[in-house]
Image: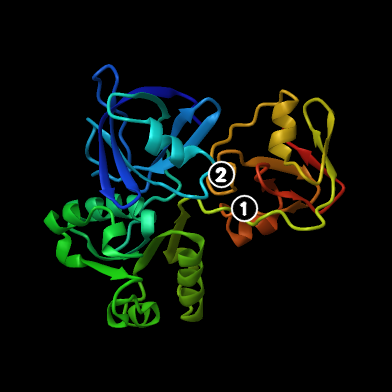
Amino acid sequence: MSTELLQVRVERRHVEAEDICTYELVSADGAPLPPFTAGAHIDVHVGAGLVRQYSLCNPPQERHRYLIGVLRDPSSRGGSKTMHEEVLAGATLQISVPKNHFPLADAERSLLLAGGIGVTPILAMAEALSARGAAFQMHYCARSPERTAFRQRIAAAPFAPQVHFHYDSGDAAQKLDLPALLAQLDRKTHIYFCGPSGFIDHVKVTSKAQQWPPEQLHLEYFGAAATPAADGDQPFEVKLASSGNVYAIPADSTVLRVLTDAGVFIPASCEQGVCGTCLTRVLDGVPDHRDLYLDESEQAANDQFTPCCSRSKTGTLLLDL
């Protein structure tokens, strides 16, 4: 995993919709930015010790800029608040090179489903699919037209006829009827969905009820909190294979926090079990998975876990650190 950081400047900051701003980032030295593919994100170093992930939502063929969209979240842990209040046009930021855990597959047909600010990677996918002349349709669910980002951009896009908007605030007839939509799709269609946890769960449950092939489902949480700490969490220990050092993990702390405080470096970003940056190999012991990154089969293998939020079902975890 590359740890290279890029210096960028905020060329423009634009209010896209209620509580949503976009930031156009350009290279501080004027050089072309590293290429990216649809579904990619960057880590943005928002402030001291504050790193947040944002999907790139501009056309992937562009090299002169990155465009990110940021929702002002009232439950923010500091990232979106800082971006909205302190990061203005002209500001300089450090970012990672683009990373993609949500790539497009090689498919004849695609269905793109966006919930709220989850539209950001989905929009880049629509741009990429349109550019290659691929068959797709996109459904964009939002609370209201006023809270819907990129409406004008989509209306002006060549793929505008393939995009359907659905609003919580509107008439029931225009709301997304996902069971009906999936029922009429070609079964070879690949489905991509991104949004808050409730939206993700609805798509997962509906597609499973219709026995949609799991390998044709692709999802990304945009930063929803992973499973919260449970009442009655027990302390446990982690042992590092390289040194043999053992660290006690209290019931009210995380493996990542304890090891970081002890000077053991683990790359991390979202700290919510969403991004997979801190994924660590487990050599012995059984993790208590609380992430949203690993799929069910990967969790069942119990050979890796996310130390930012997951815990242990056994008294000790032996980590490949």
Instruction: Provide residue 57's location: percent of width, then percent of height.
Output: 30, 46
Instruction: Provide residue 117's location: percent of width, then percent of height.
Output: 37, 54
At 33% from the left and 57% from the top, the residue drawn is: 106
Q: Which residue is mark 2?
A: 276
Q: Is residue 90 above or below residue 304?
A: above
Picture quarter with the C terminus: top right
Q: Is residue 289 left or right of residue 149?
A: right
Q: Is residue 207 left or right of residue 254?
A: left
Q: Foreground: 174 or 160? A: 174
**Disc on res. 132:** none
Tell me the SS state at disc 1.
loop
Earlier along the polypeptide chain: callout 2 or callout 1? 2
Question: Number of labelled discs?
Answer: 2
Q: Is residue 256 left or right of residue 167?
A: right
Kindly identify the amino acid type of the residue bearing the numbered disc 1.
Answer: Asp
Q: Foreground: 243 or 150? A: 150
**Disc on res. 291:** 1
Instruction: Provide residue 139's location: percent of width, then percent of height.
Output: 30, 67
Question: CA gap, disc 2 to disc 1?
Answer: 9 Å
At 71% from the left and 52% from the top, the residue drawn is: 302
Q: Residues within 10 Å of mark 2 (few under 14, many from 20)?
A: many
**CB within 8 Å, label 2 to label 1:** yes
